[in-house]
Image (cartoon, helix red, strand yellow):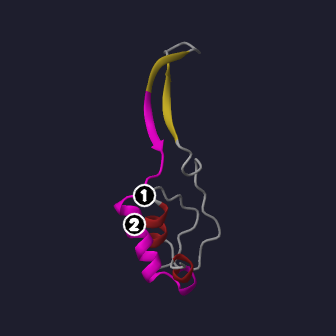
Amino acid sequence: MPLQTNTLYYGDNLHILREYIPDASVDLVYLDPRFNSNRSYNVLFKEAGSASSSPAQIEAFEDTWHWGPAAQAAFEEVALHGSDDTARLLNRS
């Protein structure tokens, strides 16, 4: 599969890299905001016609990482089926 240039991919980085990006072709991956900041990010609303903020807000997303079934499955996939160097690193005792 050829790499499509000038394309913004949105989503989980492991899924995007595995599904759309050929091996050994990545120069840069940009992640924003930083991962696992342990914060909840909110969207604030302004009153129409006013520069002041409204008390109205909603939680946009929670940036707190938890080890769960998806993380375990991803770890096992890389540890068992990743490159030899990566698998060796993850399987160190």
Instruction: Please give the count of numbered marks on the rendered protein.
Output: 2
Q: What is the CA distance from the residue labelled 1 to the residue labelled 2?
A: 7 Å
Membership of 17 in magenta stretch: no
Type of amino acid at the residue the image marks with label 2: Gln
Percent of width and height locating residue 43:
48, 31
Percent of width and height locating residue 16:
46, 65
Q: Residue at the bottom extreme?
A: 84
Of residues 47 and 65, the one nearer the viewer is: 65
Crowd band around label 1 with a 10 angstrom C-alpha radius: few (<14), some (14–19), many (20+): few
**Secondary structure found at label 1:** loop
Q: Residue at the front extreme?
A: 93
Percent of width and height locating residue 73:
37, 69
Membership of 76 in magenta stretch: yes
**Residue at image point 51% right, 81% down:** 87
Residue located beneath label 2 in the image: 72
Do labels 1 and 2 touch, CB within 8 Å? yes
**Secondary structure found at label 2:** helix
Residue located beneath label 1 in the image: 67
Percent of width and height locating residue 67:
42, 58
**Which one is earlier in the sequence, the residue at label 1 or at label 2?**
1
Type of amino acid at the residue the image marks with label 1: Trp
Q: Residue at the left extreme?
A: 69
Q: Which residues are magenta?
A: 58-86
User: Going by the image, does 72 lie left or right of 21?
Assistant: left
Q: Is residue 91 depicted above or below 57 in this figure?
A: below
User: Going by the image, does 17 lie left or right of 5?
Assistant: left
